[in-house]
Amino acid sequence: MNRSFWEQDTFTNSIDIAIIGGGIVGLSAAIHLKLESPHLKVVVLEQGIVLSGASLRNAGFACFGSPSELLADLKDRSENEVFKLVEERCKGLAQLRKLLGDPAIEYINSGGNEVFDNEELFQNCLQQLNSFNKHLFSITGCKETYGVNNKKISDFGLKGFKHLIEIKGEAQINTGKMMQAFMLKAANPGVIMLNGVKLISYEDEGNGVRLNTSWETLNAKRLLFTTNGYTSQLLKTIDVKPARAQVLITSPVEGLKINGNFHFDEGYYYFRNVGDRLLLGGGRNLDFEGETTTELGTTETIQKALEKMLAERILPLIEYTIENRWSGVMGVGNTKSPIVKQLSGNVFCAVRMGGMGVALGTGTGKDAAGLVLSSL
């Protein structure tokens, strides 16, 4: 089908920067590109009708790392590396709030909690709490980010957990409202969004990049990948692999005691209240191989495990129904730090959020925008 003059002139001709992926990183990059250089024509290509990645499919945690997650990270990396990443997450959350505003993302400072049924893991975390708190104080100014409060286990109506560590500074957001706010923020300076358009292949031709898409062939001066969990589909040499995360949410629960964010088993399980509903996700560690996929969907094995935890430990003897189940695809690798780099003369990437896209996405997008601008 031939495109009209208006389509070509306004949307597809003379593209300065094409961004692949319309999630947090992609839209953050687009916004900062237009704010810094309003004359640039910035086009975001998103393969989903709304969004297909984790940006619209996450659990809505504004978090920076639970004690057991930090403990696990310290097995492979130095303290400086681990807490530098924690600092980036905290800064990223501050950037997100500043860019969009708390009301727009329904930011609720509800606090977080990590629950334990493994005594050894809890004791190992307990031994590190003072050290963790000192590191976090230098980042957030909070003297005691982590503190033991086992009494809250019964207050929340939980069963089968032995210990609980409170996490100050964690919050909840409305993921849908956040992405809507990003889209509105991007539209104001003139970012062009093309949804339902998938990049099939590309060629860096020296004087620009040729993009072969599911819609038509486009040309741009620069190309930026912000595809996170879908990166391996086109960038085979980048250390990013998909990690699917499954989630379910209940009907409204009368008298729900759960309030705030909850982490369990080094972050492989997580739950929170969404108003008077209960959202529960995780279980990827039950089938790492099967969950290393870009296919959206749920599996009986993991959903049954989530249902069992929900019925026996989170909402025991409470009536509810499960209203919805879904999954999202994260981008993970050998380390959790984002990759922001130039791949060739005109091609760049900002990927691998390591399951912390809400915290890292805004800052990573801004960093990517700066890198691309420096090449023009």
Image: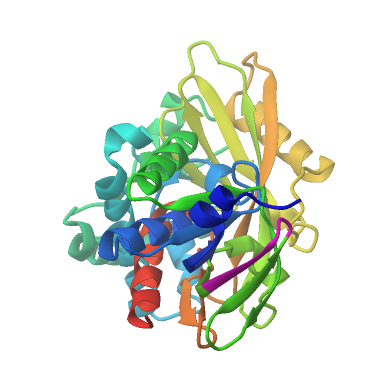
Residue at point 61%, 18% (across, down): 251
What is the quadrant of residue 250 in the picture?
top right
The quarter of the rendered structure image containing the C terminus is bottom left
The image shows residue 152 at horizontal and vertical percentages of 39, 32
Left or right of residue 140, residue 192 in this image? right
The image shows residue 66 at horizontal and vertical percentages of 42, 54
Residue at point 45%, 22% (across, down): 275
Q: As rendered, which of 116 and 335 lies closer to the eye?
A: 335
Q: Is residue 36 visible?
A: yes
Q: Which residue is at the far top?
A: 254
Residue at point 40%, 38% (across, down): 172
Q: As rendered, which of 90 and 350 lies closer to the eye?
A: 350
Q: Is residue 159 visible?
A: no
Q: Is residue 367 above or below residue 7?
A: below
Q: Which stretch did the figure color magenta?
A: 214-220
Q: As rendered, which of 126 and 144 lies closer to the eye?
A: 144
The image shows residue 294 at horizontal and vertical percentages of 73, 57
